[in-house]
Image (cartoon, rainbow, N blue to C red):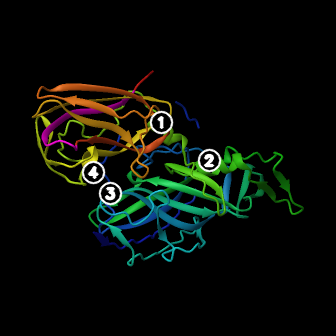
Amino acid sequence: MSMRMKFLLLSLGLVSGIFVACSKGTTQAGIEVGNPSVTVSAEFNVVKGLPSYAPLARKALYALTPDQMTWTDLRLPLTQVRYFASYYYYMPTDPNTGAALWPSSGLDSLRPMDVLKGDTLVANFDEMDIPSRSYLKEIVLQFNLSKWTVRGNSCATTSSCQKVELNFPDSTYLELRYHHDQLERVGDTGHVKLPVQFHAQVLLASVNLSGANVIVSPDSVVHVYVDSSLLESFAQSFNALRYSTHKVNSHFTNFVLTPPALVQYDSVGVNRVQNGDFSLHGANWIFLTELGGVADTSFSSDGVNVKITGGGHVDYAVQWMQEDIELIQGRWYQLKFTAKADVDSTLILVRVGRYHAPYDNLDAANQDNLAPLSTVEKEFTFDFCAKETNPFGRLEFNLGNYVRSVTIKNVSLIQQAF
């Protein structure tokens, strides 16, 4: 069943101013998209200092360092806004490509957002059918940078200033993906705000005004022709979770974590599981039955109890899951939990996998872990190496195939030092 939802994207107000190898504040499994009272806005800001994640740039603090560039024309050529979500029971769109939020017709468009003047974009999505059992993952902003120019004055000294233009290459798109944790709720209004912050210092640190890609025109304007490395710096100037650059009409899917996000997630000893002791009962967890699975849950000091009265014919007919498990490629993780059942000699399949098709295992060895349960409580430990960097892994306890009651407690998934 789907629920009609009204999105409002507004208040794009501005104030002037990888490494890959083999912590959260919310108490929900995610922002449920199918909520007709929710509106969304993205507020663009130019800020000083380097990007900081606390987590993911919510209420970040920035170093006060003087800017040598005074922007005179800093417009962002917005061409599309999309969202990505995990879906349960009903999937209206391909989760690999996301669903368009703006423009509502789905056609490619371009809207220059003037970050200095505080342009406002209002988009009404009354006619979109969005399922009520879906959890928001990311908001994606796409910019068409093809032959785009931003302008400013570079003042190395108080007595010497030059006009500078940054010229972007032809047929280039930039996509910025923002984690749902970066959205800020505005009181009890049902409004959700996305702070889109441009950290000019990151970009300017990579601009070499005497480099080979710089030409001074007869009117003394310094033209900086953006190459691939400078384009990376431009992308990393935003406080996004990850980004990609690609050519028009291509389908480039290698989204790179921004350096601050990578630093946050690449942390030894941090438990990736929220509410693993179930002190908040079912907060952060998702319960699913399908394909003949019939079950219910309850909570006690012993943890979560899943009473299964219909096991179905597949292990995933009954699932107890948590999403948004952050993994870094090549890092080792240890999954640990304690479990028992009210009948002897049954199994549960436990793994960390992808939240969307093909739902493959994110273990480099592609190992599904089988935990043999008995009526005596037992602690289980499984080690695995992540095969990719993915901020949205899904921890699954697959409990189908049996009629039984299963109790699970003390769940943790911790990055190891080795």
N-terminal label among 4 and 1: 4
Q: Residue at x 42, y 52 (%)?
A: 357
Task: Say what secondary structure mark 2 lies in.
Answer: helix
Which residue is label 3 attached to?
A: 31
Answer few, some or many: residues within 10 Å of disc 1's Cα (few below 14, many 20 plus, some between 14 and 19): many
Cα separation between marks 2 and 4 = 35 Å
Instruction: Residue under label 4, please give it.
Output: 28
Question: Please, what secondary structure does the residue beneath circle 4 have?
Answer: loop
Q: Is residue 319 left or right of residue 81?
A: left
Asked if marks 2 and 3 touch (Cβ < 8 Å), the reply is no
Label 3 close to label 4 by CB (< 8 Å): yes
Q: Nearer the viewer, residue 136 or 387?
A: 387
* Rendered residue at 30%/36% (across/down): 350
Residue 337 vs 95, above or below: the answer is above
Quarter holding residue 351: top left
Spatial distance from mark 3 to mark 1, Cα to Cα? 24 Å
Quarter-of-image position of residue 337: top left
Where is mark 1, residue-wise?
328
**Badge nearest the viewer, 3 or 1:** 1
The range drawn in magenta is: 400-415
Residue at image x 43%, y 22%? 417
Image position, residue 19 (x, y; %):
58, 35
Residue type, mark 4 in image: Gln
Query: Rounded to the nearest whole Å, what is the CA distance between mark 4 and mark 1?
Result: 23 Å
Q: Which residue is mark 2?
A: 201
Q: Residue 282, percent across and down?
A: 20, 47
Q: Earlier in the sequence, mark 2 or mark 4?
A: 4
